[in-house]
Image (cartoon, rainbow, N blue to C red):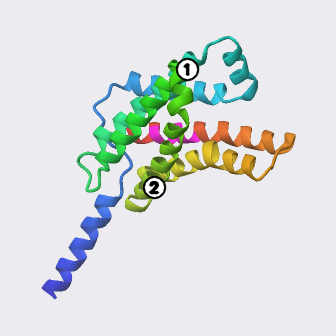
């Protein structure tokens, strides 16, 4: 009977450890909100006419900043907030942060874009998907949702457009669906991160 009680207590303890709705990042609220606003701007910048206008106006560095600042703040907050958890994924978060910063540098320095832009983009895909799945499988609650949407974010914004281009799915309707889904997934992913950090 005592042995059975210990098993029940252990199961309850594991259950409680996996349910995470909030992490304490130690970051000020205004910084997290600024990061969320940057994500919303990133969604707007991903609208094709806006993206082309920024390229034509030589404002790719602004686009790079908008696409990087929100992610870096949120990921650093999750890195710090998840440290006390039983699976913090610290090394994975540092890799994601480093790759996002490298992506910003490729936007800032055109010569880097041509030499390392593609490897950085592919590396991000190879890190986001397993990390998102690992978080989704390891936790429940809002942190679980962050993992699910991290995986969906990279699938919808990067992998699906590349695959559709490679297999020749080019039409106005397909492009419109991909554009709307990319904007939507950025907004939802940002909101999920904000809910865990605020």
Residue at (53%, 32%) from the top-left corner? 117
- Outermost residue to the bottom: 1
Which SS class for mark 2? Answer: helix
Relative vertical location of residue 193 with respect to residue 73 in this rendering, above or below:
below
**Is 12 placed left or right of 137 in the picture?**
left
Q: Which residues are magenta?
A: 188-193
Dot 1 corresponds to which residue? 110
x%, y% of residue 192?
50, 42
x%, y% of residue 171?
86, 43
The one of 105 and 92 positioned closer to us in this rendering: 105
Mark 1 Cα within 10 Å, few/some/many (few <14, many 20+)? few
x%, y% of residue 109?
51, 19
Mark 2 Cα within 10 Å, few/some/many (few <14, many 20+)? some
Camera-near label (1 vs 2) is 1
Q: Earlier in the sequence, mark 1 or mark 2?
A: 1
Dot 2 corresponds to which residue? 130
The reply to whether residue 193 is visible in this rendering is: yes
Residue at (66%, 40%) from the top-left corner? 182
The reply to whether residue 38 is visible in this rendering is: no
């Amino acid at each position: 009977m005592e042995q059975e009680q210990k098993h029940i207590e252990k199961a309850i303890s594991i259950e409680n450890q996996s349910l995470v709705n909030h992490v304490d990042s130690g970051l000020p609220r205004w910084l997290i909100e600024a990061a969320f606003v940057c994500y919303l701007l990133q969604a707007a910048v991903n609208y094709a006419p806006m993206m082309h206008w920024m390229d034509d106006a030589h404002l790719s560095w602004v686009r790079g900043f908008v696409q990087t600042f929100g992610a870096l703040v949120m990921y650093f907050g999750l890195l710090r907030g998840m440290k006390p958890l039983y699976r913090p994924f610290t090394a994975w978060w540092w890799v994601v942060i480093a790759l996002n910063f490298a992506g910003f540098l490729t936007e800032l320095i055109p010569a880097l874009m041509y030499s390392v832009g593609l490897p950085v983009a592919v590396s991000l895909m190879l890190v986001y998907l397993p990390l998102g799945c690992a978080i989704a499988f390891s936790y429940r609650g809002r942190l679980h949702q962050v993992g699910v949407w991290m995986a969906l974010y990279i699938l919808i914004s990067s992998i699906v457009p590349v695959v559709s281009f490679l297999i020749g799915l080019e039409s106005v309707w397909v492009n419109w669906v991909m554009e709307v889904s990319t904007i939507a997934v950025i907004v939802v992913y940002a909101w999920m991160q904000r809910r865990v950090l605020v």
